[in-house]
Image (spheres, rainbow, N blue to C red):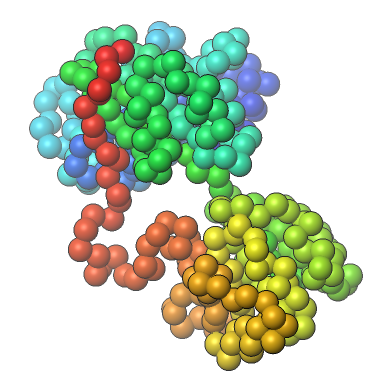
Amino acid sequence: MKELRDIIKAYDEAVLLGKRTLLATVVQVIGSSYRRPGARMLVTEDGVITGAISGGCLEGDALRRAKHAMNLQQNKLVVYDTLHETEHNIGIQLGCNGIVYILFEPINPEEAENPIQQIIKVANSREEAVLVTRFSRDKNASQTGTNLAVLATERQSFTHIDNVTELDETFLNKKSVVNSNGNQSILFQLIEPSIQLLIAGAGNDVQPLTEMTDLLGWKTIVADGRPAYATQQRFPKAGLVCLTKPSGILSATELDEYSAVVIMTHNFNYDLQVLEQLLESDCRWIGILGPARKLQRMLDALSDKGLEINEDLLNKLHGPVGLDIGAETPEEIALSIVAEIKAVFSKRSGTSLKNRSSSIHERTMPKQLLQHD
């Protein structure tokens, strides 16, 4: 989501300056590639790039092609092929053993439903959404491009469109899909809201945590009951800083399935009261800073009050918090916390990629179209 927000910001700035822009999107990958379908970058007419479609190996050639497409004001598909290099499919030493299809879309600010407006619709919501991009692998054919954004709550309003089955399956399976019927293809890209992190605590060890989450584009809220600590000046990278008692901590934000909470006030009673507030919340992950015996003591205290400690809560709880990377300093501890949250939200183990038996990236599911356009 951060990349999309960066693209929106760069686009708005370009429009104010009267610069032409183009959106480049990875629409399909066969084999291996640094970026997966849905990766995007914005290019301005003076060569400024925001976002990325590769690890850096494609951007130089893509910039040249983007300027050409902007001059033509016409959508174009470009194929980068390291499997079968020909005069038409240029590999340019990708470093990955795959074929990458890139769609170039010049943006017309006068069009109310242009691709950037579809992205804005998605970025302004905390719902799952699907971006629909239609393209043809025949590079000489007309390229429709990114022409639809569907929020999860809108699904029932789109029962009339072609390929509604694939749209529903993208939401249901929480996986992007590339559907093909001959040369005609559609990328159904699932976009999930950015992670929201509520931090209970405003000590010095929270500062590097907010800096890291800002870099990742997460929405971060810091809450604490100490006036001298809970200030925006101390946490300029946090989206919101709240001075609150434990009983009011949930008023700081609405927790959903894309939310995580880390409790790190170093005050047992405050931490305990915060955890009690979270018993019925919808957040996916709760981290407790401190040793395992602290967490067990908190659970015992809640049980003594007659509160139910169910399996769902136990599955959410992570204490001691963070991955086992030998963290000692506040910065290292922040890194281990962020890494664990990311692993949980990505449904990964957090172990070394060296020991992973399957591919690093989950494949975007290919599927034949059940309905014709």
Residue found at x 46% / y 25% = 23
Q: Nearer the viewer, residue 285 or 60?
A: 285
161 with respect to 356 (left or right): right
Residue 96 is drawn in which quadrant?
top left
Residue 172 is drawn in which quadrant?
top left
Q: Position of residue 31 (x, y in %)?
A: 19, 42
Q: Position of residue 267 (x, y in %)?
A: 75, 83
Residue found at x 31% / y 9% = 142
Seen in the picture, residue 237 relative to 92 is either above or below; the reply is: below
Any part of residue 84 in sight: yes
Residue 161 is drawn in which quadrant?
top left
Residue extending furthest toward the right: 227
Name the image quarter holding the C terminus.
top left
324 with respect to 252 (left or right): left
Q: Nearer the viewer, residue 316 or 39?
A: 316
Residue extending furthest toward the front: 306
Q: Position of residue 268 (x, y in %)?
A: 73, 85
Seen in the picture, residue 5 relative to 287 is either above or below; the reply is: above
